[in-house]
Amino acid sequence: MEQSIFSHVYPNGLVLVAEEMQSLESAAFTFRVPAGCIYEPADRGGLAGLTCEMALRGAGPRDNRQFINDLDNLGVERGESVSDAHTNYSGATLAKSLLPTLAIYADLLERPHMPDDQLESGRLIALQELSAVEDEPAQKVMLELRRRHYPDPWGRPSQGSEQGLTNSSMDEIRAFFSRHYRPDGTILGIAGRFDWPRLRDAVGELLAGWKAAPQAEPKEAPLGPRVAHLEHESNQTQIGVAYSSAAYRDADYFQAWGSVGVLSGGMSSRLFTEVREKRGLCYSVYASHHSLKDRGAVMCYAGTTAERAQETLDVMLGELRRLGDGVLREELDRLKARIKSALIMQQESSSSRSAALARDWYYLGRVRTLDEIGRLVDELSCDTINAYLADHRPQDFTIVTLGPQALEVPVGVS
Amino acid sequence: MEFLEHTLANGLEIVAECNSEARSTALGFFVKTGSRDESDAIAGVSHFLEHMVFKGTPTRSADDVNREFDEMGAHYNAFTSEEKTVYYAAVLPEYLPPAVELLADIMRPSLRDDDFNTEKQVIIEEIRMYEDQPPFGADDRCKALHFGQHPLARSVLGTVESITNLPVDAMREYFQRRYSPGNIALVAAGQIDFDQLVAIADRACGAWQPVKAPRAIMPADPASHFACEVRDTATQEYVIQLANGPSATDKDRFAAKLLATILGDDTGSRLYWEIVDPGHAESASLSHHDYHGTGLYGTYLACSPENTQENMQRVLDIYREAEGDGCTPEELDQAKNKINARVVLSSERPRGRLFNVGANWTYRHEYRSVKDDLDAVERVTLADIGRVLARYPLTTNTTMAIGPIGGLQAPK
C-alpha cells in the first residue's frame, strides 16, 4: 500500500503529521492537545471538559455564534472529547475548506474569549452530561471499571464530578487553559486531499505565535478496592471485567492485541460464541484493548438479565482464563484476515487516518505505515502469541457490576 | 462510476454502483419487509428472523456462517426497521464471490428449533437492554400513539411477551411469505465485476421460488396527542415528539431534510441556539425520516427534569415561529453547506454508498448518484421550505415525555 506520510516539528514544539490521500474529496484533522483530565486538580473533576466547552464559545474575531456558524458554513463535521492525557478537537470537511477551518481552530487555541457571561451555560451542559451517565448503565459500569483498574489520575472519567464542575471558576478555567493548551505536546494529525508544502507553511503561519509552556506530569495515587457492585434498579445487570495488558508502544503489543482479537473480534470470536451464540446469555458482549502511554488493559463487557448474570460472569471469566492456554491456528488466520481488510478500508476514510496518525505520534513519536503494520501482523504466529500469553495469563481481574443484586466473585480472582 | 442493473427470472433484482477506484466492495440483500408487515400474533418476528438468518442453512451451521465471514475479514451485520431488513458485508474485492455466495445462502435459513429457542433469549435480552436505556421504550410507545391503526405503529423489537409466545412455525410461515425473490434486491457498491456478480447471484438465488409479497401503503393521519410517563429510576427527563412529514417518494423530502437541519441540527440550529447553547438541555434535535407512503419528523429532547416544561414550550415556540415566518436565506445556505459536506463524507466509502443506493432502489426504483442528491439539495428554495411547513406542520404532533417527574402538560 503506497502512502505519502509527512511530518514537521515547528520551533514551538507543535507536531504536524499528515497523510496525503488524493483519491478523496475530503480532509480530516485531529488536534491532540495535552490538556486531559489527568491534569485536573483532584477536587476539580470535569475542569478539562469545561475548559474545552468554554474554548468553543468564541475566539479571535468571532463571538460564540459566529464561531459555530462559520464552522457550520464550512461544512465541518466536528467533535470534541477529553481523554486521560488530551483534549481532542477533530473534524472532517471538503478538502477545499481545510485551511479556513484550521484558521478558526488556531484562534481557539491561541485567542479564545472564554466569556464570563457564558460560564453558567457551559457548566449546565457539563452537569447534564454528567447526569446522563446515570441513565446509561452500560457506560456507567465501564467508566467505573476504568476508574478502579487504573490508579488515579489515569482512570478518571472525563465527565468529572458534580462538586468539581460546580466549584470550577472562570479563573481556574483560564489557568487550566494557559497551562495546558500549549504547542509543545500538541499533535495535529491531518489526512485527506491537500498539498503538503502549502499545508506545512499554512499551519506554521497560523500557529507559529503559540507559546510553549512547562508542564509537570501528575502524581499517581494508590489503587483502591478492585471488586465492586453498584446498586441500580434495572432489568439487566451490567458486568465489566478488566485485566492488565501491554501498552501500544511495547514490543509485545501486537501479541497482546492479537490475543484480544481472538477473544472478541468478529462473530466467530470466543466471547461472542460462548456467551451469546451457544448460551444466549446476552445481546452485547465484547472485550477491547485499551492503551495508556506506559500501560494497557483489556476491558470486557456484558449486559444480561439479573437472573442470568452470575452464569454470564462465570462464563466470561472462564474464557479469559482459557485464553491463557493459548490460541489456535485457525483463530489466528481469521484474525489476520480481519486486520488486513480493516487496514485497507482505513484508507477509504480521512477521519480514521487522521486520528491514527495523531495517536501513533503520541505513543511512538512516529507513524507506523500500513505496510509496517501488515508486516507485524504477518509475523504473528500461534507460537509468538502463546509465548506471550504463557507469560501474561489474563488474571488479577478488576470486576465491577451494576444492577439489582451483587454477584459472587470467585475467591482469589482479583 | 457506473450504475448497472439486472433482474433474474424469478424477480430478484441486482443493482450495483461500480467504482473502479474503490479499494473495497460493499454488498447487501435489501428485503422489503419489517414490523409494518406484521400482525399482533407475530409482533417482532421480522427482527427475530434477522437474527435467525445467521443461524445456518442446510449446508452450514451457525458456527460455519460466523467463521466463513470472519475468514474473509468481512465487516458484516444486519438491521431491521419498520419496513426493511438489510443483510450486508464489506469485503476486499477478491472476496466478492464467496461473500455473495455466503450471503445468498443464509438468505434461505434452516430456522431450526434449537437455534430458535436459544436466540429467543438473546432477543429478550436485547429488549430488556433497551428498556434500561433512555428513552426506556418511550420511542416505541410514542410511535404507537402517533400512528394509531397505521401499520407503522408497530414496534420493530416486539415485546418480551410477544417474543416469548412466538412459535417457530409462525416465523417459518412469515419467511415464506416475505422473503420472495421479487421482494428482495441484491445491492452492491464499490469495486465490482458486475457480470461476475450476476452470474454468482443467478447460481445462488436463481432457484428461489417467487410468491406475492404485497404491502399495505397508506398515508398517516396527522393528529396531536400528549402523554407523560413517570420513570422514577431515571435521572434526566426525555421527550420524544413525532409529526408527519414528506414520504420517501415525495420530492419535498429534500426540503424537509434542510428544514430539519435549520431548525434542529445538533449544531448551529434554532434548537441548538435557543436550548442547547444556553445550557437548558443536554440535547435538543429535529430529524426527518421517510417511509413508504408517509414520513416522520422526530424531535428529541434530553434535559434536567425541572427544565422540561419550559423546554417543551421553547420547542413549540420555535416551530410556531418557523411556520409563521419561514426561514432566512442565510439559514438555508448554511444548511445546504452542511448537508453537502455530509453527503460527500458519507459517500467516500463503498459501505456508505451501499445504503444510499439500496434505499433509492427499494423505495423509488431509481438510481441517484452523489451529484444527483447534491443537485437536489442545491435546488431547494425558501418557498419549498415554506410549502413543506404548511403541508406538514411541526406543531401538530404526538409528544411523549418520560422521566422522574409526572404532571407535565402539553405546551400552549
Image: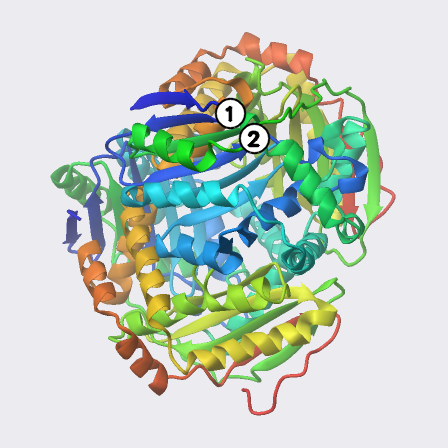
Measuring 68% from the left and 12% from the top, which residue is drawn there? B391
Q: Position of residue A411 (x, y in %)?
A: 60, 91
Q: Is disc 2 in contact with disc 1, using a CB cutoff of under 8 Å?
A: yes
Task: State the residue position of label 1.
Answer: B10
| Outermost residue to the left | A197
Task: State the residue position of label 2.
Answer: B209
Query: Where A273 falls versus B177 (above or below)?
Result: below
Measuring 32% from the left and 28% from the top, which residue is drawn there? B194
Location of residue B218 by image quarter: top right
Which type of secondary structure does the marked residue at label 2 adopt?
loop
Position of the C terminus of chain A by quadrant: bottom right
Which type of secondary structure does the marked residue at label 1 adopt?
loop
Residue A70 seen: no
> Which kind of residue does numbered mark 2 sit on?
Gln
> Which kind of residue does numbered mark 1 sit on?
Asn
Q: Position of residue B281 (x, y in %)?
A: 65, 43
